Amino acid sequence: MSSYVRGLKCRECSREYPKAPLHVCEFCFGPLEVAYDYEGAGRTLTRDAVSRRPPSMWRFRELLPLDGEPTVGERVGGTPLVRAHRLEKQLHLRELWIKNDAVSFPTLSFKDRVVSVALSKAREFGMSTVACASTGNLANAVAANAAAAGLHAFVFIPHDLEQSKVLGTTVFGARVVGIRGTYDDVNRLCSEIAGKYGWGFVNVNLRPYYAEGSKSFAFELAEQLGWRLPQHVVVPMASGSLLTKIGKAFRELGALGLVDPAPVKLHGAQAAGCAPIVEAVNKGADLIKPVRRPETIAKSLAIGNPADGYYAIRAIRESGGHAAAVSDDEIVAAMRLLAQTEGIFAETAGGVTLAAALRLLEEEKLPRTESIVVSVTGNGLKTTDPLASRLDPPTLIGPSLKEFDALASKEA
Amino acid sequence: MATVRIPTPLRKLTKNQEEVAAAGHTIAEVIADLEKNYPGIKERICDDSGAVRRFVNIFVSDEDIRFLKNLDTPVKDSDEISIVPAIAGG
Protein backbone atom coordinates (compact mmCIF):
# COMPACT_ATOMS: atom_id res chain seq x y z
CA MET A 1 0.00 0.00 0.00
CA SER A 2 1.28 3.47 -0.74
CA SER A 3 1.71 6.27 1.75
CA TYR A 4 -0.72 9.13 2.02
CA VAL A 5 1.43 11.17 4.38
CA ARG A 6 2.48 14.40 2.73
CA GLY A 7 4.57 15.68 5.59
CA LEU A 8 4.19 17.66 8.80
CA LYS A 9 2.53 21.02 9.26
CA CYS A 10 2.47 23.45 12.17
CA ARG A 11 -0.98 23.79 13.67
CA GLU A 12 -0.30 27.39 14.58
CA CYS A 13 1.60 29.01 11.73
CA SER A 14 1.10 26.41 8.95
CA ARG A 15 4.83 26.12 8.17
CA GLU A 16 5.51 22.80 6.49
CA TYR A 17 8.14 20.24 7.38
CA PRO A 18 9.26 16.97 5.80
CA LYS A 19 8.47 13.60 7.43
CA ALA A 20 11.02 13.47 10.25
CA PRO A 21 11.17 12.86 13.99
CA LEU A 22 10.09 16.43 14.76
CA HIS A 23 7.28 17.56 17.00
CA VAL A 24 7.41 21.33 17.34
CA CYS A 25 7.63 24.12 14.84
CA GLU A 26 11.11 25.57 14.75
CA PHE A 27 9.67 29.01 14.45
CA CYS A 28 6.72 29.33 16.84
CA PHE A 29 7.01 26.12 18.90
CA GLY A 30 3.50 25.14 17.84
CA PRO A 31 2.70 21.43 17.54
CA LEU A 32 3.34 19.72 14.22
CA GLU A 33 0.57 17.63 12.76
CA VAL A 34 0.60 15.00 10.03
CA ALA A 35 -0.76 16.23 6.68
CA TYR A 36 -2.44 13.62 4.45
CA ASP A 37 -3.33 13.29 0.83
CA TYR A 38 -7.03 12.70 1.53
CA GLU A 39 -7.93 12.32 -2.10
CA GLY A 40 -5.50 9.45 -2.46
CA ALA A 41 -6.56 7.89 0.85
CA GLY A 42 -10.22 8.06 -0.11
CA ARG A 43 -9.63 6.01 -3.26
CA THR A 44 -8.87 2.83 -1.31
CA LEU A 45 -10.45 3.51 2.08
CA THR A 46 -14.05 2.50 1.49
CA ARG A 47 -16.60 0.78 3.71
CA ASP A 48 -16.32 -2.31 1.61
CA ALA A 49 -12.50 -2.44 1.73
CA VAL A 50 -12.51 -1.88 5.50
CA SER A 51 -15.01 -4.66 6.11
CA ARG A 52 -12.75 -7.18 4.34
CA ARG A 53 -9.64 -6.36 6.40
CA PRO A 54 -8.56 -8.09 9.64
CA PRO A 55 -10.19 -6.72 12.81
CA SER A 56 -7.39 -4.44 13.97
CA MET A 57 -6.85 -0.67 14.02
CA TRP A 58 -4.96 -1.08 10.74
CA ARG A 59 -8.28 -1.47 8.91
CA PHE A 60 -7.97 2.32 8.73
CA ARG A 61 -4.38 2.24 7.60
CA GLU A 62 -4.75 4.99 4.97
CA LEU A 63 -5.43 7.53 7.73
CA LEU A 64 -2.56 6.38 9.97
CA PRO A 65 0.82 8.00 9.32
CA LEU A 66 3.06 5.16 8.14
CA ASP A 67 4.91 4.93 4.84
CA GLY A 68 4.99 1.14 4.75
CA GLU A 69 3.01 -1.63 6.41
CA PRO A 70 2.92 -1.62 10.25
CA THR A 71 5.77 -3.64 11.74
CA VAL A 72 4.86 -3.19 15.40
CA GLY A 73 1.47 -3.88 16.95
CA GLU A 74 -0.07 -5.38 13.82
CA ARG A 75 -2.88 -6.87 15.93
CA VAL A 76 -3.72 -3.86 18.10
CA GLY A 77 -7.28 -2.52 18.06
CA GLY A 78 -10.63 -4.04 17.26
CA THR A 79 -11.87 -3.68 20.84
CA PRO A 80 -15.55 -4.22 21.64
CA LEU A 81 -18.26 -1.58 21.49
CA VAL A 82 -20.78 -2.72 24.08
CA ARG A 83 -24.44 -1.66 24.22
CA ALA A 84 -24.91 -0.88 27.91
CA HIS A 85 -28.49 -2.10 28.32
CA ARG A 86 -28.50 -2.43 32.09
CA LEU A 87 -26.91 0.94 32.61
CA GLU A 88 -29.35 2.48 30.13
CA LYS A 89 -32.22 1.15 32.17
CA GLN A 90 -30.82 2.32 35.46
CA LEU A 91 -30.04 5.81 34.16
CA HIS A 92 -33.16 6.12 31.96
CA LEU A 93 -31.18 6.54 28.76
CA ARG A 94 -32.23 5.74 25.23
CA GLU A 95 -28.88 4.67 23.80
CA LEU A 96 -25.63 4.18 25.71
CA TRP A 97 -22.49 2.49 24.44
CA ILE A 98 -19.16 1.65 26.05
CA LYS A 99 -16.12 1.56 23.76
CA ASN A 100 -14.01 -0.83 25.77
CA ASP A 101 -10.26 -0.44 25.43
CA ALA A 102 -9.89 -2.03 28.86
CA VAL A 103 -9.36 -5.20 26.82
CA SER A 104 -6.92 -3.71 24.32
CA PHE A 105 -4.26 -6.16 23.15
CA PRO A 106 -1.56 -6.48 24.40
CA THR A 107 -1.47 -4.15 27.44
CA LEU A 108 -5.09 -3.37 28.31
CA SER A 109 -5.25 0.31 27.49
CA PHE A 110 -5.76 2.52 24.42
CA LYS A 111 -2.07 3.37 24.56
CA ASP A 112 -1.41 0.23 22.50
CA ARG A 113 -2.94 2.13 19.57
CA VAL A 114 -0.66 5.16 19.73
CA VAL A 115 2.39 3.06 20.50
CA SER A 116 1.98 0.70 17.56
CA VAL A 117 1.98 3.73 15.26
CA ALA A 118 4.91 5.40 17.06
CA LEU A 119 7.10 2.29 17.14
CA SER A 120 6.34 1.35 13.54
CA LYS A 121 7.33 4.91 12.68
CA ALA A 122 10.49 4.68 14.81
CA ARG A 123 11.49 1.70 12.70
CA GLU A 124 10.81 3.58 9.49
CA PHE A 125 13.17 6.27 10.81
CA GLY A 126 15.79 3.58 11.53
CA MET A 127 15.71 4.07 15.31
CA SER A 128 16.56 1.15 17.57
CA THR A 129 15.89 2.74 20.98
CA VAL A 130 12.48 4.05 21.91
CA ALA A 131 11.37 5.88 25.03
CA CYS A 132 8.46 7.65 26.69
CA ALA A 133 7.34 9.80 29.59
CA SER A 134 4.42 7.98 31.12
CA THR A 135 1.81 7.93 33.84
CA GLY A 136 1.72 4.12 33.53
CA ASN A 137 -0.40 2.87 30.67
CA LEU A 138 1.95 4.25 28.07
CA ALA A 139 4.87 2.70 29.94
CA ASN A 140 3.21 -0.72 29.71
CA ALA A 141 2.43 -0.29 26.01
CA VAL A 142 5.90 0.94 25.04
CA ALA A 143 7.62 -1.79 27.04
CA ALA A 144 5.51 -4.66 25.67
CA ASN A 145 5.36 -3.56 22.05
CA ALA A 146 9.08 -2.71 22.04
CA ALA A 147 9.89 -6.13 23.46
CA ALA A 148 7.83 -7.87 20.78
CA ALA A 149 9.56 -5.79 18.11
CA GLY A 150 13.06 -6.26 19.49
CA LEU A 151 13.54 -2.55 20.22
CA HIS A 152 15.31 -1.18 23.30
CA ALA A 153 12.99 0.78 25.58
CA PHE A 154 13.63 3.49 28.15
CA VAL A 155 10.61 4.38 30.23
CA PHE A 156 10.42 7.44 32.48
CA ILE A 157 7.70 7.57 35.14
CA PRO A 158 6.84 9.56 38.25
CA HIS A 159 8.18 7.73 41.32
CA ASP A 160 4.76 7.17 42.94
CA LEU A 161 2.93 5.13 40.28
CA GLU A 162 0.71 2.14 41.01
CA GLN A 163 2.80 -0.97 41.66
CA SER A 164 0.96 -2.95 38.98
CA LYS A 165 1.81 -0.37 36.35
CA VAL A 166 5.48 -0.45 37.35
CA LEU A 167 5.67 -4.27 37.33
CA GLY A 168 3.73 -4.34 34.06
CA THR A 169 6.59 -2.35 32.54
CA THR A 170 9.72 -3.87 34.06
CA VAL A 171 8.55 -7.41 33.26
CA PHE A 172 9.08 -6.67 29.55
CA GLY A 173 12.72 -5.82 30.08
CA ALA A 174 12.38 -2.08 29.62
CA ARG A 175 14.79 0.16 31.47
CA VAL A 176 12.52 1.99 33.91
CA VAL A 177 13.62 5.27 35.46
CA GLY A 178 11.49 6.73 38.26
CA ILE A 179 11.70 10.49 38.64
CA ARG A 180 11.23 12.19 41.99
CA GLY A 181 8.60 14.64 40.81
CA THR A 182 5.24 14.92 39.08
CA TYR A 183 4.44 13.73 35.57
CA ASP A 184 5.04 17.26 34.34
CA ASP A 185 8.57 17.11 35.78
CA VAL A 186 9.10 13.78 34.00
CA ASN A 187 7.85 15.32 30.79
CA ARG A 188 10.17 18.29 30.94
CA LEU A 189 13.15 16.05 31.60
CA CYS A 190 12.15 13.83 28.66
CA SER A 191 11.92 16.83 26.34
CA GLU A 192 15.50 17.64 27.24
CA ILE A 193 16.67 14.03 26.95
CA ALA A 194 14.97 13.63 23.58
CA GLY A 195 16.82 16.67 22.26
CA LYS A 196 20.12 15.27 23.44
CA TYR A 197 20.05 11.50 22.83
CA GLY A 198 18.21 11.17 19.54
CA TRP A 199 16.02 8.28 20.66
CA GLY A 200 12.50 7.80 19.43
CA PHE A 201 10.48 9.35 22.25
CA VAL A 202 6.96 8.31 21.37
CA ASN A 203 5.34 11.31 23.03
CA VAL A 204 8.06 13.85 22.34
CA ASN A 205 9.81 13.75 18.93
CA LEU A 206 7.46 11.06 17.52
CA ARG A 207 4.38 12.72 18.98
CA PRO A 208 2.77 13.90 15.71
CA TYR A 209 2.66 10.28 14.47
CA TYR A 210 1.92 8.74 17.86
CA ALA A 211 -1.09 10.97 18.51
CA GLU A 212 -2.67 9.99 15.19
CA GLY A 213 -3.04 6.44 16.54
CA SER A 214 -5.83 7.68 18.82
CA LYS A 215 -8.02 8.29 15.80
CA SER A 216 -8.45 4.54 15.40
CA PHE A 217 -10.54 4.51 18.61
CA ALA A 218 -13.10 6.72 16.84
CA PHE A 219 -12.81 5.05 13.43
CA GLU A 220 -13.69 1.70 15.00
CA LEU A 221 -16.49 3.21 17.01
CA ALA A 222 -18.15 4.64 13.89
CA GLU A 223 -17.83 1.36 12.00
CA GLN A 224 -19.18 -0.60 14.97
CA LEU A 225 -22.21 1.69 15.14
CA GLY A 226 -22.97 0.63 11.57
CA TRP A 227 -21.11 3.52 9.91
CA ARG A 228 -22.90 6.11 11.97
CA LEU A 229 -21.65 8.83 14.29
CA PRO A 230 -22.93 9.03 17.87
CA GLN A 231 -24.44 12.30 19.07
CA HIS A 232 -22.21 12.44 22.16
CA VAL A 233 -18.86 11.01 23.19
CA VAL A 234 -17.52 11.36 26.72
CA VAL A 235 -13.72 11.24 26.78
CA PRO A 236 -11.17 11.20 29.63
CA MET A 237 -8.57 13.96 29.38
CA ALA A 238 -4.95 13.94 30.47
CA SER A 239 -3.01 15.84 27.78
CA GLY A 240 -6.30 16.33 25.91
CA SER A 241 -4.92 14.64 22.81
CA LEU A 242 -7.40 11.73 22.64
CA LEU A 243 -10.40 14.06 22.66
CA THR A 244 -9.04 16.25 19.87
CA LYS A 245 -8.11 13.20 17.77
CA ILE A 246 -11.57 11.67 18.20
CA GLY A 247 -13.03 14.88 16.79
CA LYS A 248 -10.53 14.82 13.93
CA ALA A 249 -11.30 11.16 13.12
CA PHE A 250 -15.04 11.84 12.85
CA ARG A 251 -14.36 14.76 10.51
CA GLU A 252 -12.11 12.62 8.34
CA LEU A 253 -14.71 9.85 8.08
CA GLY A 254 -17.29 12.41 7.05
CA ALA A 255 -14.99 14.06 4.52
CA LEU A 256 -14.15 10.69 2.94
CA GLY A 257 -17.82 9.76 2.72
CA LEU A 258 -17.58 6.75 5.05
CA VAL A 259 -20.26 8.24 7.31
CA ASP A 260 -22.81 11.00 6.90
CA PRO A 261 -21.10 14.01 8.40
CA ALA A 262 -23.03 14.83 11.57
CA PRO A 263 -22.18 16.97 14.55
CA VAL A 264 -20.81 14.98 17.48
CA LYS A 265 -20.63 16.71 20.84
CA LEU A 266 -17.33 15.99 22.57
CA HIS A 267 -17.46 16.02 26.37
CA GLY A 268 -14.29 16.07 28.47
CA ALA A 269 -13.75 14.34 31.82
CA GLN A 270 -11.07 14.97 34.45
CA ALA A 271 -10.54 14.26 38.12
CA ALA A 272 -11.19 17.19 40.45
CA GLY A 273 -7.65 16.88 41.83
CA CYS A 274 -6.21 17.67 38.40
CA ALA A 275 -8.71 19.42 36.13
CA PRO A 276 -6.92 22.24 34.30
CA ILE A 277 -8.82 21.66 31.04
CA VAL A 278 -12.26 21.34 32.66
CA GLU A 279 -11.64 24.50 34.67
CA ALA A 280 -10.76 26.48 31.56
CA VAL A 281 -13.82 25.17 29.69
CA ASN A 282 -16.16 25.97 32.56
CA LYS A 283 -14.69 29.44 33.09
CA GLY A 284 -14.83 30.25 29.41
CA ALA A 285 -11.06 30.78 29.40
CA ASP A 286 -8.68 30.06 26.52
CA LEU A 287 -5.59 29.68 28.63
CA ILE A 288 -4.79 26.73 30.82
CA LYS A 289 -3.77 27.41 34.38
CA PRO A 290 -1.41 24.50 35.06
CA VAL A 291 -1.97 22.39 38.20
CA ARG A 292 1.22 22.27 40.18
CA ARG A 293 0.55 19.28 42.40
CA PRO A 294 -2.09 16.95 40.95
CA GLU A 295 -3.82 14.90 43.61
CA THR A 296 -6.13 12.16 42.43
CA ILE A 297 -6.47 8.41 42.40
CA ALA A 298 -6.78 8.70 38.60
CA LYS A 299 -3.03 8.87 38.15
CA SER A 300 -3.21 8.11 34.45
CA LEU A 301 -4.93 11.48 34.01
CA ALA A 302 -2.67 13.43 36.37
CA ILE A 303 -1.11 15.86 33.91
CA GLY A 304 -1.02 19.35 35.41
CA ASN A 305 0.24 21.06 32.26
CA PRO A 306 -1.59 19.34 29.39
CA ALA A 307 0.12 19.67 26.00
CA ASP A 308 -3.11 19.67 24.01
CA GLY A 309 -5.19 21.48 26.60
CA TYR A 310 -5.66 24.49 24.40
CA TYR A 311 -6.89 22.38 21.50
CA ALA A 312 -9.11 20.23 23.72
CA ILE A 313 -10.84 23.36 25.04
CA ARG A 314 -11.48 24.47 21.49
CA ALA A 315 -12.69 21.04 20.35
CA ILE A 316 -15.16 20.82 23.24
CA ARG A 317 -16.44 24.35 22.73
CA GLU A 318 -16.76 24.15 18.95
CA SER A 319 -18.59 20.82 19.14
CA GLY A 320 -21.09 22.19 21.66
CA GLY A 321 -19.87 19.76 24.32
CA HIS A 322 -19.26 20.21 28.03
CA ALA A 323 -16.73 19.23 30.67
CA ALA A 324 -16.90 17.92 34.22
CA ALA A 325 -14.43 17.24 37.03
CA VAL A 326 -15.28 14.54 39.56
CA SER A 327 -14.10 13.60 43.06
CA ASP A 328 -12.22 10.43 44.01
CA ASP A 329 -15.38 9.07 45.68
CA GLU A 330 -17.40 9.65 42.52
CA ILE A 331 -14.67 7.88 40.53
CA VAL A 332 -14.81 4.76 42.67
CA ALA A 333 -18.61 4.77 42.72
CA ALA A 334 -18.66 4.94 38.91
CA MET A 335 -16.08 2.14 38.61
CA ARG A 336 -18.36 -0.02 40.77
CA LEU A 337 -21.47 1.00 38.85
CA LEU A 338 -19.91 0.03 35.51
CA ALA A 339 -18.61 -3.24 36.92
CA GLN A 340 -21.93 -4.14 38.55
CA THR A 341 -24.18 -3.23 35.64
CA GLU A 342 -22.07 -4.14 32.62
CA GLY A 343 -19.38 -6.47 33.92
CA ILE A 344 -16.65 -4.12 32.78
CA PHE A 345 -13.79 -3.36 35.14
CA ALA A 346 -12.42 0.01 34.03
CA GLU A 347 -9.43 1.70 35.57
CA THR A 348 -9.77 4.86 37.61
CA ALA A 349 -9.75 6.96 34.42
CA GLY A 350 -12.81 5.00 33.23
CA GLY A 351 -14.43 5.84 36.57
CA VAL A 352 -13.66 9.50 35.87
CA THR A 353 -15.32 9.27 32.46
CA LEU A 354 -18.49 7.55 33.60
CA ALA A 355 -18.74 9.77 36.70
CA ALA A 356 -18.40 12.84 34.47
CA ALA A 357 -21.17 11.46 32.22
CA LEU A 358 -23.40 11.00 35.28
CA ARG A 359 -22.70 14.58 36.34
CA LEU A 360 -23.47 15.94 32.88
CA LEU A 361 -26.72 13.93 32.80
CA GLU A 362 -27.68 15.39 36.16
CA GLU A 363 -26.88 18.90 34.95
CA GLU A 364 -28.95 18.19 31.83
CA LYS A 365 -25.96 18.93 29.64
CA LEU A 366 -26.15 15.39 28.28
CA PRO A 367 -29.65 14.59 26.95
CA ARG A 368 -31.05 11.22 27.98
CA THR A 369 -32.77 10.71 24.63
CA GLU A 370 -29.68 10.91 22.42
CA SER A 371 -26.93 8.41 21.56
CA ILE A 372 -24.01 8.54 23.99
CA VAL A 373 -20.66 6.74 23.94
CA VAL A 374 -18.56 6.51 27.09
CA SER A 375 -14.86 5.91 26.38
CA VAL A 376 -13.18 3.35 28.61
CA THR A 377 -9.47 3.57 27.91
CA GLY A 378 -7.83 1.33 30.51
CA ASN A 379 -8.24 -1.73 32.72
CA GLY A 380 -9.23 -1.75 36.39
CA LEU A 381 -6.81 -4.53 37.26
CA LYS A 382 -4.03 -1.98 36.88
CA THR A 383 -5.46 0.44 39.43
CA THR A 384 -6.76 -1.70 42.27
CA ASP A 385 -5.01 0.29 45.04
CA PRO A 386 -7.79 2.85 45.64
CA LEU A 387 -10.44 0.12 45.64
CA ALA A 388 -8.87 -1.99 48.37
CA SER A 389 -9.91 0.37 51.16
CA ARG A 390 -13.36 1.00 49.68
CA LEU A 391 -14.67 -2.51 48.96
CA ASP A 392 -15.81 -5.03 51.55
CA PRO A 393 -13.29 -7.82 52.14
CA PRO A 394 -14.54 -11.38 51.52
CA THR A 395 -16.33 -13.12 54.40
CA LEU A 396 -14.11 -15.76 56.01
CA ILE A 397 -15.46 -19.07 57.29
CA GLY A 398 -14.04 -22.55 57.93
CA PRO A 399 -14.55 -25.36 55.38
CA SER A 400 -17.73 -26.32 57.20
CA LEU A 401 -21.29 -26.62 55.86
CA LYS A 402 -22.62 -25.58 59.26
CA GLU A 403 -20.73 -22.32 59.14
CA PHE A 404 -21.95 -21.65 55.63
CA ASP A 405 -25.55 -22.46 56.58
CA ALA A 406 -25.29 -19.96 59.41
CA LEU A 407 -24.03 -17.34 56.97
CA ALA A 408 -26.68 -18.15 54.36
CA SER A 409 -29.51 -17.91 56.89
CA LYS A 410 -28.23 -14.49 57.99
CA GLU A 411 -28.32 -13.25 54.41
CA ALA A 412 -31.71 -14.74 53.49
CA MET B 1 25.72 35.02 34.75
CA ALA B 2 22.97 32.44 34.71
CA THR B 3 23.14 29.36 32.50
CA VAL B 4 20.43 28.98 29.86
CA ARG B 5 19.70 25.59 28.30
CA ILE B 6 18.69 25.98 24.67
CA PRO B 7 16.15 23.57 23.10
CA THR B 8 16.91 21.93 19.76
CA PRO B 9 14.66 24.23 17.67
CA LEU B 10 16.67 27.28 18.78
CA ARG B 11 20.18 25.90 18.48
CA LYS B 12 20.70 27.16 14.97
CA LEU B 13 20.63 30.62 16.53
CA THR B 14 23.15 29.73 19.23
CA LYS B 15 25.62 28.08 16.83
CA ASN B 16 24.52 24.67 18.09
CA GLN B 17 25.43 25.44 21.69
CA GLU B 18 23.21 23.52 24.12
CA GLU B 19 23.99 25.91 26.95
CA VAL B 20 24.83 29.58 26.91
CA ALA B 21 25.44 32.17 29.63
CA ALA B 22 23.18 35.21 29.89
CA ALA B 23 23.11 38.25 32.15
CA GLY B 24 20.05 39.72 33.84
CA HIS B 25 18.21 39.98 37.12
CA THR B 26 14.88 38.82 35.71
CA ILE B 27 13.77 36.46 32.94
CA ALA B 28 12.86 39.48 30.80
CA GLU B 29 16.39 40.83 31.17
CA VAL B 30 17.89 37.43 30.42
CA ILE B 31 15.86 37.20 27.21
CA ALA B 32 16.97 40.72 26.24
CA ASP B 33 20.60 39.71 26.81
CA LEU B 34 20.13 36.55 24.73
CA GLU B 35 18.72 38.69 21.93
CA LYS B 36 21.82 40.91 22.05
CA ASN B 37 24.15 37.94 21.54
CA TYR B 38 21.89 35.75 19.39
CA PRO B 39 19.75 38.11 17.30
CA GLY B 40 16.36 36.71 16.39
CA ILE B 41 15.98 34.51 19.46
CA LYS B 42 13.54 36.80 21.26
CA GLU B 43 10.80 36.62 18.62
CA ARG B 44 11.03 32.85 18.80
CA ILE B 45 10.46 32.81 22.56
CA CYS B 46 8.01 35.71 22.83
CA ASP B 47 5.01 36.70 20.74
CA ASP B 48 4.34 40.14 19.26
CA SER B 49 3.03 41.46 22.56
CA GLY B 50 6.24 40.43 24.32
CA ALA B 51 4.62 37.62 26.33
CA VAL B 52 6.17 34.14 26.39
CA ARG B 53 4.64 32.12 23.53
CA ARG B 54 1.83 29.72 24.40
CA PHE B 55 3.87 26.66 23.50
CA VAL B 56 7.09 27.65 25.28
CA ASN B 57 7.78 26.76 28.90
CA ILE B 58 10.54 28.46 30.84
CA PHE B 59 11.92 27.00 34.05
CA VAL B 60 14.18 28.70 36.57
CA SER B 61 16.02 26.05 38.53
CA ASP B 62 13.28 23.51 37.74
CA GLU B 63 10.35 25.79 38.59
CA ASP B 64 7.90 26.87 35.86
CA ILE B 65 7.94 30.69 35.70
CA ARG B 66 4.14 30.62 35.41
CA PHE B 67 4.15 29.52 39.06
CA LEU B 68 6.61 32.34 39.89
CA LYS B 69 6.41 35.84 38.44
CA ASN B 70 6.47 35.06 34.71
CA LEU B 71 8.83 37.44 32.93
CA ASP B 72 9.51 39.28 36.20
CA THR B 73 10.78 36.12 37.89
CA PRO B 74 14.08 37.00 39.58
CA VAL B 75 17.24 35.27 38.33
CA LYS B 76 20.45 34.64 40.29
CA ASP B 77 23.85 33.92 38.76
CA SER B 78 23.71 30.37 40.09
CA ASP B 79 20.34 29.69 38.41
CA GLU B 80 19.90 27.29 35.56
CA ILE B 81 17.24 28.40 33.11
CA SER B 82 15.60 25.90 30.75
CA ILE B 83 13.59 26.83 27.68
CA VAL B 84 11.47 23.80 26.82
CA PRO B 85 8.86 23.23 24.10
CA ALA B 86 5.50 22.81 25.84
CA ILE B 87 4.18 20.22 23.41
CA ALA B 88 5.13 16.86 24.84
CA GLY B 89 3.65 14.01 26.76
CA GLY B 90 0.22 12.55 27.32
Image (spheres, grey):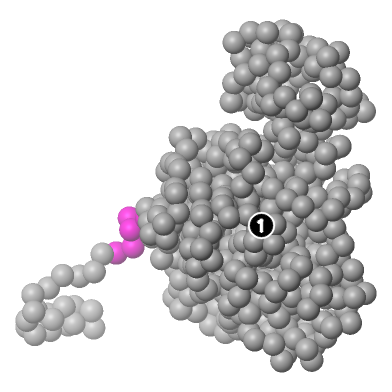
Residue closest to the far front: A126
Asked if the stretch drawn in magenta spans residue A75, the answer is no
Q: Position of residue A204 (x, y in %)?
A: 66, 47
Q: Which chain is indicated by disc 1?
A: A
At horizontal 85% and vertical 30% (from top left) the residue drawn is: B44
At horizontal 69% and vertical 87% (from top left) the residue drawn is: A53
At horizontal 90% and vertical 50% (from top left) the residue drawn is: A16
At horizontal 73% and vertical 12% (from top left) the residue drawn is: B22
The quarter of the displayed image where residue A29 is located: top right
Q: Is residue A66 in view? A: yes
- Residue A308 lies left or right of residue A392; in this view the side is right
Region in magenta? A385-392
Q: Position of residue A137 (x, y in %)?
A: 52, 58
Asked if the stretch drawn in magenta spans residue A387, the answer is yes
The quarter of the displayed image where residue A250 is located: bottom right
- Residue A277 lies left or right of residue A335; in this view the side is right
Amino acid type shown at disc 1: Gly
- Residue B85 lies left or right of residue A137; in this view the side is right
Please name whichever residue, B88 or A74, is drawn nearer the observer in this view of the structure.
Answer: A74
Q: Is residue A390 in view? A: no
Q: Position of residue A44 (x, y in %)?
A: 84, 83
| Image quarter hosting the N terminus of chain B | top right
Graded by Cα atoms within 10 Å as few (under 14), some (14 to 19) or many (20 or more), the crowding at tag 1 reads few
- Residue A331 lies left or right of residue A40; in this view the side is left
